[in-house]
Image (cartoon, grey):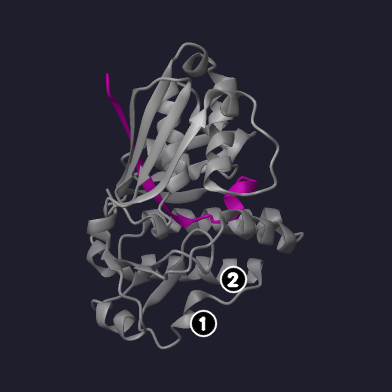
């Protein structure tokens, strides 16, 4: 019997890095996500195939049950070792899927290009958690790490406010249907960032003003959600970008790459990487294309 599970991708609009220390983050689930398809197998093995959005295979491997129950210690970061680590933690949370099975044929199907960084790992972890009926936040914490906002996006079909309170994820659905959505665009920078590296950088640069920074973030986040005009939304987004620039001791994306852009730009998630938010009165496609950036997605095509 075939089982199929699906999870949404994610974009973090406010609260990057600070969400790890209890700040409120505003995040948007995307129309693009990932499927996990489970079928019966044999030989105490999992035959795993992962497909990109263009139907090309980007990962194919056979994993034995013994590799999952008793993984070897390895310093090598590979897709296989990461997958085994996730499945091992899933096994510790629900041993039945190994102990009471002959094997599996497992397929994953991305609805977005893998390089986009919309949550290849988080959608996988949430899908595995759905399949095995375990807590996706615990599975993430025990395997990959991170704040968990991406898991919250995977599980929700509306914009969310996300925070970690007393080490527990708090998810609040919010209404965000701005009249100015037609002025919002997501631009892909084609510079894949490692979340682990970015988080390490944040901790290295974290100063003694954490409480003040969190308060500032939360105030701006509320202003972003409650903005009723393009002008007020853009002002709040720009304020957030400048605040994070000071915290991270990094240039804003506008300063670094697009100083002549007529509008507001904001880094999303790990700074310097995947997508940025562009706020513009005019369609900025020609501007970014002239700079060599060809993937510009309107808000309505990206966000649920």
Q: Magenta span has 110?
A: no
In front of the other: 272 or 16? 272
Q: At x 44% / y 14%, what residue is drawn?
A: 101
Q: Residue furthest bottom?
A: 260
Q: Earlier in the sequence, mark 1 or mark 2?
A: 2
* Residue at the (49%, 66%) spot, across then down: 273
Is residue 188 placed above or below 304 in the rendered structure?
below
What residue does disc 2 label? 245
Measured from the top left, where is residue 33 in percent x and y?
A: 33, 45
The residue stretch that appears in magenta: 1-22
Marks 1 and 2, how far apart at CA: 10 Å
Residue 245: quadrant of the picture: bottom right
Label 1: which secondary element: helix
Vertical order, 157 against 25 (above or below) = above
Residue 286 image point, x, y percent: 25, 82
In this figure, which residue is indicated by the disc labeled 1?
255
The question of residue 3 being in magenta is answered with: yes
């Amino acid at each position: 019997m075939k089982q199929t599970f699906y999870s949404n991708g994610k974009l973090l609009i406010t609260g990057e890095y600070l969400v790890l220390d209890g700040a409120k983050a505003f995040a948007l689930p995307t129309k693009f996500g990932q499927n996990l398809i489970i079928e019966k197998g044999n030989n105490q093995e999992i035959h795993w195939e992962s497909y990109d959005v263009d139907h090309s295979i980007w990962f194919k491997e056979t994993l034995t049950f013994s590799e999952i129950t008793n993984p070897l210690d390895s310093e090598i970061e590979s897709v296989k070792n990461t997958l085994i680590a996730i499945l091992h933690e899933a096994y510790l949370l629900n041993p039945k899927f190994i102990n009471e099975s002959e094997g599996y044929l497992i397929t994953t199907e991305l609805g977005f290009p893998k390089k986009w960084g919309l949550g290849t790992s988080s959608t996988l972890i949430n899908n595995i958690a759905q399949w095995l009926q375990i807590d996706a936040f615990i599975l993430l914490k025990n395997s990959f790490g991170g704040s968990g906002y991406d898991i919250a996006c995977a599980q929700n079909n509306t914009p969310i406010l996300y925070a970690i309170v007393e080490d527990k994820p708090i998810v609040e659905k919010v209404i965000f249907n701005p009249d100015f959505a037609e002025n919002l665009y997501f631009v892909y920078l084609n510079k894949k960032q490692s979340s682990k590296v970015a988080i390490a950088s944040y901790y290295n640069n974290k100063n003694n003003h954490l409480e003040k920074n969190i308060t500032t973030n939360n105030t701006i986040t509320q202003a972003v959600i409650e903005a009723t005009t393009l002008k007020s939304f853009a002002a709040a987004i720009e304020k957030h970008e400048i605040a994070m620039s000071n915290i991270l001791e990094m240039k804003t994306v506008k300063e670094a790459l697009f100083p002549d852009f007529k509008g507001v730009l904001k880094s999303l998630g790990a700074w310097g990487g995947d997508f940025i938010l562009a706020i513009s009165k005019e369609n900025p496609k020609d501007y970014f294309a002239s700079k060599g950036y060809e993937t510009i997605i309107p808000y309505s095509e990206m966000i649920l």
